[in-house]
Amino acid sequence: MAGAVAAAAAPSAGIELNWPMTSFSRNVPLLAVCQALMMSSNSLIGATSALVGLEIASDKSLATLPQALAMVAVMLTTVPAALLMQRIGRKRGFMIATLFGATGSVLATVAIIKAEFWLFVFAVALVGVFNGFGNYYRFTAADVSDDAHKSRAVGYVMAGGIAAAFVGPNVAELTRELVPDAPFAGSYAAQLGFYVLSFVAISFFAFPRKSENSHARSETPARPLKAIARQPKFVVAVICGMLSYAIMSLVMTATPLAMQSHAHLFEDTSFVIQWHLVGMFAPAFVTGHLIKRFGLFYVMLTGVLAGFACVVINLSGTSVGHFWTALVLLGISWSFLFIGASTLLTETYREEERAKTQSANDFMVFSAVAAASLSAGAIQTSFGWQAINISVLPLLLIILISLFWARRQLLR
């Protein structure tokens, strides 16, 4: 990788000498801002979409369908997004993506006012298209950083989502009654501002030649995806990324419905989702340092143990305190596992293999997330909160087994 960077920088001595930290210090904070805005939008959807669905859907078991189809949209967008940004550059791709998010916000507002459930589903799916692009923020941060800063860059960008813990749920709560007789319509109108600010932030990106040049050549030809996917590192990265995100999505998506079924106020639900997001993103400030000091295995093992602790607490009670503690642990579990998996994936490809490897990984990850989100409403309404939590235990066990399998080979 270092050789490819040097080769890409060769046309300019200034770029060769200053590229790693100049690019890191300029672009990573901007990527963190964009991540914060994207996750603020997602946290608003996470706190409200199931409740909106419950209000305007004729079939209440479809309450989580909007968020689930948003994940399907993410899944279907990952490969086209990677190919488009390989062709036109990530900056232009990210800017185009904001148009989908903005359109989704406007249509969601109209759908809630008119009580049109399927229009609301379509609107939230458009936000999912934006997220299909935005999920490349973390890989972009790694790609504009040298090898010594990759895990920190991924962590710092993911840490940008800490703002989402406070912005998204609070915007939802403050604007919930802004439009009379249409709860949360004002929330989705306010969501439009996230995409306007994202467009502005993206306009300041200044990617080095290496990041935008999708046709950079190396001395060896690019390997087929099958060869890349056979690497143990790739297998472990995909398993951990896919299942950790699916677990988080399943439990988080069902939480608003579970809390409402136990007669908790929306303010309590907003509080729990807010602190769940703190658990997701606050550790990202130090995850890169922890990985460098203790290694991927121990950081990711801690994530698995936090996941098991979340399940135990959720099964032991349904007070606000139980939901709060469990969802914070769920966020920490996701943070350690997903950042660890994303870091591990960056070690499996060369520059010319970047787009297809990242898109294949995210396609599999968000396929699992879409399935989890689609299942959440049906499991919660048909079988209840305990069934949600019991269903994630096999997934945590698979992650645990994969980590111990990889320990001797990869994560020493």
Image (cartoon, rainbow, N blue to C red):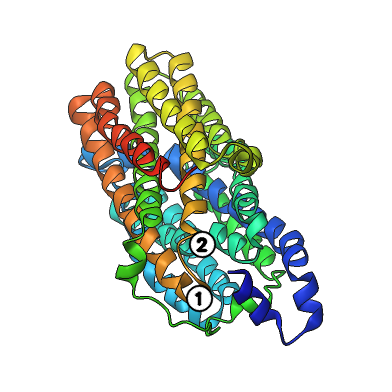
Q: Earlier in the sequence, mark 1 or mark 2?
A: 1
Q: Residue 271 falls in which quadrant of the image?
A: top right
Regarding mark 2 in the picture, which secondary structure is present there? loop
Where residue 95 sits: x, y (%)?
Answer: 58, 71
Query: Could you say where residue 205 lies in the image, as x and y percent from the top left?
Result: 69, 69
On the rendered structure, is 230 left or right of 4?
left
Where in the figure is residue 16, as x and y percent of width and height?
Answer: 75, 76
**In terms of depth relative to the viewer, which is nearer, 172 or 378?**
378
Kindly identify which residue carries mark 2: 136
Tell me if I can see residue 185 in this picture. Answer: no
Is the residue under label 2 in contact with that under label 1 (CB below 8 Å)? yes
Name the amino acid type tagged 2: Tyr
Please tell me whether residue 208 is drawn above or below residue 170 in the rendered image. Answer: below
What amino acid is found at the position of numbered circle 1 in the picture? Met
Q: Which mark is residue 85?
A: 1
> Residue at 37% across / 49% down in the picture?
236
Question: Quick check: 359 left or right of 191?
Answer: left
